[in-house]
Image (spheres, rainbow, N blue to C red):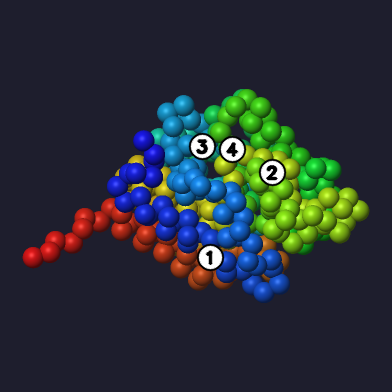
Amino acid sequence: MSTATVSGAAVFENVDRLSQVEMRPQGLPAGIIGQLYAVARGDGEPLALQAAAALREPSIERVACVTGIAGGLLPRGEVDGPIGAAALANALVNAGKTADVVVPQAMVHVAEAVRAAIGGDFRVVSELEATPDGYDAAVTIEKLGRNRKGVFHTIFGAPLQDQAPTGDEFTEAMNRAGKLTVGIGDGGNEIGFGAIFDRAREIVPHGMDCGCPCHDGLVTSTATTIVFPASVSNFGAYAIAAALGVLDEKPLLLVSPTRIAAAVEAAVTNGCLDGGTFEPGRVADDGIPIEGVMAYVSLLRTIACQHFRPPPRHA
């Protein structure tokens, strides 16, 4: 039976719709998420539902939530990624799984501060210590991936020389072992978009030619079993957590606006930058002020919580 036939299946459509609403500031690529989402979903069920249902399988016991961009202008990483990884890891633990947040060594203290703000019984692990054989599934959240020539790029097509292919190699090893992989991204340059490589190159700016010496475009060639394009990668992770909550009938799995705000502030306090503006100390995510982030999480929570409410009685 299709997972979309569960009671209240429309909730998953609304969760996905909300995750597609673009709010990033002027100057960042716009109008691409809906197109990428349509290609990634095809004729299938909502992507948050697909990912949540796959992660709920009994064979999936231990999950790696892989995230983090550290280096260059982001020595302690950016806000997008670590918060979503922690929120999803917390939801997975509350759903009965074991979950680790896997980050570059330079971001371990950031991820630990985020964990303290969000709460949750999950581990923070350096990507130098995590091995694919220790997990049944991996979810990458805003994790840059290399293109066909092995080059990493910003969303504007500029090459990044200080990124290691650790995330790509981890994901590819999981794929070779036949394990579940889920990639969440918002620009085409993150792990996962190799699953829709040709179409993504046509859709995103600098997808066909990045303009750097490699001239191969910014789209990563690293694929995942499921790729979930979202307006902000963290938002996609929150959406999957919400879908898990609905499937498990556990409101406890839903993310909280106040805890997300506290987690963003903790990340910024520990050196993370808002990836939309690069303004030190700005409490925001991909250029979206924290008030907008909290509004998104509040709407997401409302959509999911309406599923738990009994229908009104009519006379």
Report if the CB atoms under discs 4 and 2 are less than 8 Å apart: no
Would you name the residue on which mark 4 appears? 225
Whether 136 is drawn above or below 30: the answer is above
Q: Is residue 153 left or right of residue 270?
A: right
The spot of residue 188 in percent (x, y) is: 69, 53
Instruction: Using the numbered discs, state the Cα–Cα distance from disc 2 to disc 1 in whole angstroms.
Output: 23 Å
Q: Which residue shows up at 69% across the image and 33% down it?
A: 172
| Tag count | 4
Amino acid type for the residue under numbered disc 1? Val
Would you name the residue on which mark 2 appears? 194
Label 2 neighbour load within 10 Å: few <14, some 14-19, many 20+: many
Q: Is residue 210 left or right of residue 107?
A: right
Which disc is residue 99 wearing? 3
Q: Residue furthest front?
A: 43
Disc nearest the viewer among 2 and 3: 2
At mark 1, the secondary structure is loop
Disc nearest the viewer among 3 and 1: 1
Disc nearest the viewer among 4 and 3: 4
The spot of residue 21 in percent (x, y) is: 53, 65
Instruction: Using the numbered discs, state the Cα–Cα distance from disc 4 to disc 3 in whole angstroms.
Output: 19 Å
Amino acid type for the residue under numbered disc 3? Ala
